[in-house]
Amino acid sequence: MGRRNASIHSLIALAVAAAALALPGSALAWEFYGQVGIGSYSGPCIFYWNMARCSGWNYWAVGSCTDYSGGTILCGFENTNRIRGRYLGAGQSVAQTPYDLGMGGYLLAHGTWWSGPNATIEANAS
């Protein structure tokens, strides 16, 4: 049951992201492209604020990250109580909903450096 539900939720997340990009006049509500690592400060991040990039607070439907090069990142969502996400290495991508990570409500989307060299990433949420 767990793997099947995870696959279904991943497909839903990808469909939501594709639909948001395909709609005329639609835009991602938050997007970041650049490096994360020690010293990558981002104002609204709560956890690991000195090595992450975060969106503003919102009721996000989907978030995604691509780790183009460098070390491992954690891509997901956070609130004042917890940070959750999926780990990605260079060349990997993920699209996920807060529900996929057991979260919901008013959240920050994030791309957080976790280990290795600085990572060049693209992170977004809508």
Image (tube, rainbow, N blue to C red):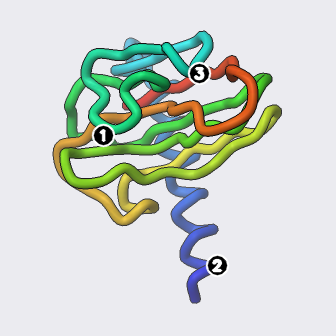
Q: For marks 2 and 3, give the CA distance.
A: 32 Å
Q: Residue visible at 34% across and 21% down?
A: 29
Identify whether 80 is placed above or below 115.
Answer: below
Q: For marks 1 and 3, give the CA distance.
A: 24 Å
Q: For the residue labelled by badge 2, is the local secondary structure a helix, a strand or a loop? A: helix
Amino acid type of the residue that numbered disc 2 sits on in the rendered structure: Arg
Q: For the residue labelled by badge 1, is the local secondary structure a helix, a strand or a loop? A: loop
In which image quadrant can residue 6 be found?
A: bottom right
Q: Which residue is mark 1?
A: 60
The spot of residue 49 in percent (x, y) is 36, 27
Amino acid type of the residue that numbered disc 3 sits on in the rendered structure: Gly
Q: Which residue is mark 3?
A: 37
Q: Residue visible at 64% across and 22% down?
A: 121
Amino acid type of the residue that numbered disc 1 sits on in the rendered structure: Trp
Q: For marks 1 and 2, give the CA distance.
A: 23 Å
Q: Which residue is mark 2?
A: 3
The spot of residue 37 in percent (x, y) is 59, 21
Q: Residues within 10 Å of mark 2 (few under 14, many from 20)?
A: few
Identify whether 69 is placed above or below 74.
Answer: above
Q: Residue visible at 49% across and 51% down?
A: 85
Q: Residue visible at 67% across and 30% down?
A: 66
N-term mark: 1 or 3: 3
